Amino acid sequence: MSQPKKERKGFNFPHVYIMFLLVMLLVVVLSWVVPSGQYERTTDPETGVQTLNTDVFHYVDQQKPIGFLDFFTALHNGVVQSADIIVMLLFASGALYLLEKSGAIAAGIHKLLRVAQGKEKLIIVALLTVFAVMGTIGFGEGGIPFIPLAMAVVMGMGYDRITAFATSTVGLAFGFTAGAVNFYTTGGSQSIVGLPIYSGLLFRIIALVIFVAISVIYILRYANKTKIHPDKSIVADEYAVQLEEAKSAEFEEEPFTLPRKIALLGLIGVLVGSAYGAIKLGWAMPELSAVYAIYALFLVIILRMKPSEAAADFGIGASRLLPTALAIGFARSVMILMTQAEIIDTAVHALAGLLSNTGSIITLLALFLVVIFFNFFVVSGSGKAVILMPIMGPLGKILGINQQVMVLVYQFGDGFTNYLWPTSGGLMAALGMSNVNYADWVKFSWKLFLILHFAAFLLIVIAQYIGLGPS
């Protein structure tokens, strides 16, 4: 008989929606303290891309201070402006629910677990690598729908929920951060400072390997410890119930039929096709949504589902993502209020002034920490690139810091905290879908991310000393 779950003692993190409201309130307070300012902006008539003229900055009178109603309309506008990501996740969740209800996922996992006996660690490393590859090509939110699938495999091998969540999420984190071919950070920031797109690829691959090694050691150490001593699990109460149910359960194994095999091969095709489309064809969220819609129709045909029942199930699957969708939208609301307050340019201008007379290593460390902190408010990688790189690029030239190194500072400072800061809509989406408590995740991951940040800065210093070039 399972024991009732013990109540948490001490401080409990508030609900994610409350955290977003508190951060939004902080932005309102800052808007009364930090003066509004603007850099001169010009728009390319052909591409529509907006650039900053870092030589022209002026303070402005706040024409539209944040009012009472503005605070709450920002929630609506945040959801609307995040619609491309939200819709993609809704389509993905709907399609994957069809796959789940068909029994294909259960059949595939049972088959994999039989093969994995005695090779559990290798499976964890393989899953980490798969998610790292997804991250390094720019799959942030795009990788979220696959997290519960990977978690089912890891938990099926007898590991706790935290190990399962880390296996997928940390892979996305260090893959996105290394950014070998990540257009949102690497490609976008390189284009702003005039470097060839995806130049410095070898150095980024080396960084990826180092991040993989650190993460594998950290996760397997925790996984081994908790499997031997389940009471040391961060989610010990739940883990005890999980292990007890696994002992007493009599699994009726789903037959791994040919249609189910084809359905799972189709899922692999979705992943590979999405990656190719993102890298080679410039696909964004609309095209990824279309891929999942096509995959849902493919499942209906291959698995011989009744169309009306499949349509209803698709809606049920999508509805499971509603709390997650709101979290993503609320995260965007923070940026909306900062833009309305016009304090982003002021903060960047002050930063440039402070660092203009410092040495290169101190400047690199300061910029690295600033990007990490800035990511708390502006999670969007491409959005931050447009704001920060026009400042970081010229600053690097003044101080004799290679532009490729400045790009590394930006992308390494941006990536990891996407999976740590509570203002990250993607993280909150993944936590919600995976039934993982934010406080539990922080308790597990903060040391890992501290180590990864330390390694990342050492790589930045090495890049500076070897004069990492544009090749």
Image (cartoon, rainbow, N blue to C red):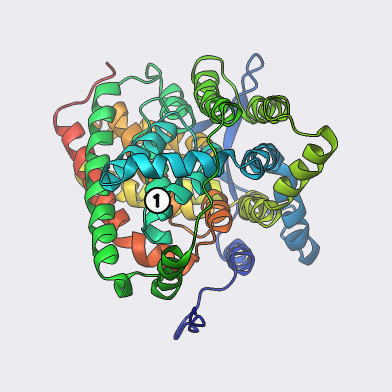
- Quadrant placement of the C terminus: top left
Q: Provide residue 254's location: percent of width, then percent of height.
A: 55, 43
Label 1 Cα crowd, 10 Å radius (few <14 / some 14-19 / many 20+): many
- The residue located at (53%, 51%) in the rendering is 252
Q: Does 294 sit above or below residue 86? A: above
Residue 111 at least partly seen: yes
- The residue located at (67%, 51%) in the rendering is 321
Q: Does 448 sit above or below residue 403? A: below
Residue 230 figure quarter? bottom left
Question: On the rendered structure, is 364 left or right of 380?
Answer: left
Which of the pair 275/11 is nearer the observer? 275
Which of the pair 422/343 is nearer the observer? 422
Q: Does 265 sit above or below residue 27? A: above
Q: Provide residue 175's location: percent of width, then percent of height.
A: 37, 37
Q: Provide residue 435's location: percent of width, then percent of height.
A: 54, 61
- The residue located at (42%, 55%) in the rendering is 155
Which residue is farthest right? 308
Please state which amino acid type lies under the numbered disc 1: Val
In the rendered image, which residue does mark 1 sit on?
Answer: 154
- The residue located at (22%, 57%) in the rendering is 221
Question: On the rendered structure, is 137 left or right of 357?
Answer: right
